[in-house]
Image: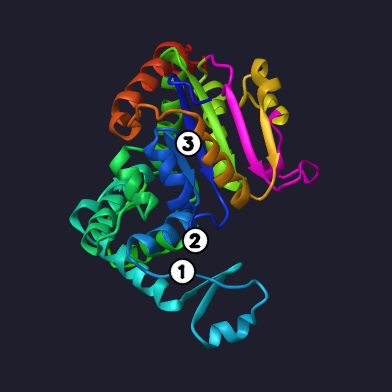
Amino acid sequence: MLADDVTVALSVTGALTPAGLGMSALIPLMEAGFVDWVVSTGANLYHDTHFGLGLAMHQGTFQADDVELRDQGVVRIYDIFFDYHVLLDTDAFFRELIGGPEFQRTMSTAEFHHLCGKYVRAREEALGLTHRSLLAAAHEYGVPIYTSSPGDSSIGMNVAAKALEGNQLLLDVNADVNETAAIVWDAKTSGGKSAVWILGGGSPKNFLLQTEPQIQEVLGIAEKGHDYFLAVTDARPDTGGLSGATPAEAVSWGKIDPDQLPGTVICYADATIGLPLLAAYALARHAPRRRKRLYDRREELMARLKKSYFESGRAAEPSPRR
């Protein structure tokens, strides 16, 4: 899975960055070239930004009295506490960014996060901090980060609030769908392979996996599915939900290459346990890879996908007679 010709996608759900796993696991994996592109919840990116701004998060307890916490201005994410002003300060940071001239247009979430990462990195440098923020590290290493539901987080809420003032920023979900499919298509047609590493489940899991149905089912381009599947989840398959769906079920959708099904892996564990163990193992046992810097190649990859769509995909089919 970490061979040089494998493009590794990572989906991130659950409260991973608030627990410090961005700094301790995800950034080192990016730095080593082990993660090439990411689909994350907006919440993980929002709470990641607290660290880049030098704001404090504290270990607490899930058994606290939440009414009392609210009265004291303390916010809780399971067993993590932080002051309510951390939210207000982070909101103010994003609203200031969103109001800037660079943001007055339509863009993919990867481009939006790349621009945000530039400014988070500048704030880190001003504060004398290093590699505290996943957004800043992704900007530095050219790793595109997508959000499958951009309105479902405090970042998206601030984008919406600025729109009430006439701000022109629009996050283009069509570009996200096509850019992620283009990344996978390039990986497969350039003599390499595509790997998916899923932490948790939810919308990011499906958005990452749906790249293959987008190529096969919707664009009509012949393909077989992702080559590697590694998931860390506590979701059961018997509920019928996407979070617990197995790679075997994914084969039926064309998401996973059926020939690779015997090698797929699901680890039923809390991702806050599984991620640091897997990261430590990979970093100790495998030499760093050359970073693919896929963010810098987005236009090239989109051009290749579009060419295939019009030459051998559904767009090349004769129009039906009326």
Which residue is identified by label 3?
283
Position above or below: 9 against 57:
above
Amino acid identity at mark 1? Met
Task: Please state which amino acid type lies under the numbered disc 2.
Answer: Pro
In front: label 3 or label 2 = 3
Residue at x 56% of width, y 50% of height: 13
Image marks 2 and 1: residues in contact by CB distance under 8 Å: yes
Point out the tag, 3 or 1, that comes first from the N-terminus: 1
Mark 3: few/some/many CA within 10 Å (<14, 14-19, 20+): some
Q: Which residue is mark 1?
A: 57
Horizontal and vertical percent for residue 301? 35, 24
Q: Picture quarter containing residue 303?
A: top left
Say which residue appears at 69% left-offset and 39% top-offset. Answer: 267
Query: Can you give x and y, in whole percent of width and height, for residue 264 in the image?
Result: 66, 27
Q: Dot 1, how many residues are within 10 Å of its Cα: few (below 14), some (14-19), or many (20+)?
A: some
- Tell which residue pokes out farthest to the left in this image: 101
Point out the stretch of residues depicted in magenta. 222-247
| Kind of residue at badge 3 | Leu
**Sooner in the amino-acid sequence: mark 3 or mark 2:** 2
Give the residue pinned by disc 2: 18
Magenta stretch encompasses residue 246: yes
Q: Residues within 10 Å of mark 2 (few under 14, many from 20)?
A: many
For the point 68% across and 30% down, the residue is 247
